[in-house]
Amino acid sequence: MSAVPGMPLHAVAHVVRPMTEADLPRIHCIELASYDHPWSLGNFADSLEAGYSMWVREAEGEVTGYYVLMVAAGEAHLLNLTVAPTWRRRGLGRDLLAHCMARACDHHADSLFLEVRTSNAGAIALYHASGFADLAVRRGYYPAGEGREDALIMRRDLPC
């Protein structure tokens, strides 16, 4: 039976597990439904092959979210964190972000960086609420419908 998005989260069994190649088609469907300029299937496959820390959140076998984390030289970089559209606004992004920070600590990272579209107010609010600070703006970083969009670079020191 598929999880019902309207059900309270505590009524649905959730698990966070490492992403596998078999997950990529489902991940890519969520990505396509979430963004005007999504990652390609190849971006996810390349990240898996490169050994990035990639995790999937499932509810009764349904993928509800995922993230991609790159760690090197004591720093972690959150490359992608996405919650399926029907599962948003229920705390899953916050939970995935907490899981991501714990994995960054497992890799002995001192800080976690990310870029977010300046138009993505919901994500920016989540990151601020999770202790991230604005670091800089990267002009024209993201493709947009007409031209390019700026990225806000954010950073959080990790308590590892």
Image (cartoon, rainbow, N blue to C red):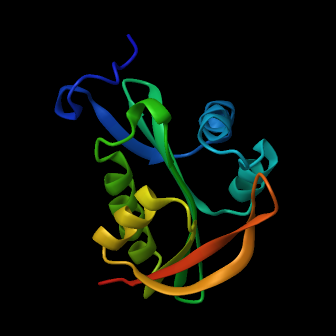
User: Which quadrant: the N terminus?
Assistant: top left
Extreme residue toward the front, this view? 146
> Which residue occupies the foreground of this view, 29 or 116?
116
Estimate the x, y position of residue 21 in percent, counting from the top left: 68, 40
Q: Residue at x 31, y 35 (%)?
A: 14
Q: Residue at x 35, y 83 (%)?
A: 158
Q: Residue at x 71, y 58 (%)?
A: 47
Estimate the x, y position of residue 101 in percent, counting from the top left: 39, 69
Estimate the x, y position of residue 127 in percent, counting from the top left: 39, 68
> Which residue occupies the foreground of this view, 127 or 61?
127
Estimate the x, y position of residue 144 in percent, counting from the top left: 75, 57
> Which residue occupies the foreground of this view, 11 or 102?
11
Whether residue 55 can be seen here: no
Residue 143 to residue 114: above or below = above
Q: Is residue 10 left or right of residue 151?
A: left
Extreme residue toward the top, this view? 1
Whether residue 24 can be seen here: yes
Residue 47 to residue 58: above or below = below
Residue 10 to residue 112: above or below = above
